[in-house]
Image (tube, coloured by chain):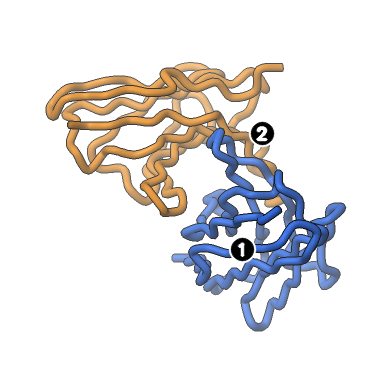
Chain colours: A orange, B blue
Amino acid sequence: NAGVTQTPKFRILKIGQSMTLQCTQDMNHNYMYWYRQDPGMGLKLIYYSVGAGITDKGEVPNGYNVSRSTTEDFPLRLELAAPSQTSVYFCASSYSPDSLNEKLFFGSGTQLSVL
Amino acid sequence: AQTVTQSQPEMSVQEAETVTLSCTYDTSESDYYLFWYKQPPSRQMILVIRQEAYKQQNATENRFSVNFQKAAKSFSLKISDSQLGDAAMYFCAFHNAGNMLTFGGGTRLMVKP
């Protein structure tokens, strides 16, 4: 059982470049999330999705876009990379929206540097 | 909006001893869950323990236990018999009905042999 898989693990971008961070889960989870973790800080929610075709903004969505065409995949797009987007990005998933007692499964993270 | 505060950026404990990590939160909701996550150098987020707000009994998981004070909005983590493998960043998190997980800023735990 692979769980939540993120690619790439590391990436360096130049200012103004674009890229897509990939996230795939094989647990048939409805809910998926993207977080960013700045150095020495906790995680902040960028976007989340409650199912295929449905996405919504989190706390820090500016500069990012997402799509959810399938249950398994939830890619995060950076269109014009800026130094402020240097961070570690985590994808996570959970199964049900009906219970508050829902464990989140995290990917291993993507270290992104924008220079 | 909910906020989660961890007032200890770093903590240190001697191997085999006990350490307590602090967490406070602010919310107007009555139904929610609280979590402690461990983040080792591998960066993976690992669930350590969770507490349901409607339960008065404090959650325990082997060497890990919490002291949940709902009125004070406090949720501390106690690690007993600390081991070298416990060294990591620890994050307190709040989970509400909107399915948003709000994290604190983290506490770095160092374990001395």
Q: Amino acid at mark 1?
A: Ser
Residue A71 visible in the shown view: no
> How far across and how far down the image is residue B10, in percent?
52, 63
> How far across and how far down the image is residue B68, in percent?
73, 72
Q: Label 2's element? A: loop
| Label 1 chain ID | B
| Label 2 chain ID | A
- Residue at 28% over, 32% down: A113
| Most distant residue in the left direction | A16
Q: Which mark is residue A95?
A: 2
- Residue at 44% over, 18% down: A7
- Residue at 17% over, 31% down: A115
Q: Nearer the viewer, residue A80 or B10?
A: B10
Whether B71 is drawn above or below B26: the answer is below
| Most distant residue in the front direction | B113
10 Å crowding of disc 2: few (<14), some (14-19), many (20+): some
Residue A83, picture quadrant: top left
Q: Nearer the viewer, residue B49 or A75?
A: B49
Whether B10 is drawn above or below A53: the answer is below
Residue B103 visible in the shown view: yes
* Nearest to viewer (mark 2 / mark 1): 1
Q: Label 1's element? A: strand
> How far across and how far down the image is residue A12, in percent?
27, 24
Q: Which mark is residue B12?
A: 1
Q: Which mark is residue A50?
A: none
For the residues marked 2 and 1, what is the alpha-carbon distance in whole angstroms? 36 Å
Q: Nearer the viewer, residue A5 or A86?
A: A86
Q: Amino acid at mark 2?
A: Tyr
Residue A104 appears left or right of A33: right
Q: Nearer the viewer, residue B85 or B113?
A: B113
Whether B87 is drawn above or below A3: the answer is below
10 Å crowding of disc 1: few (<14), some (14-19), many (20+): few
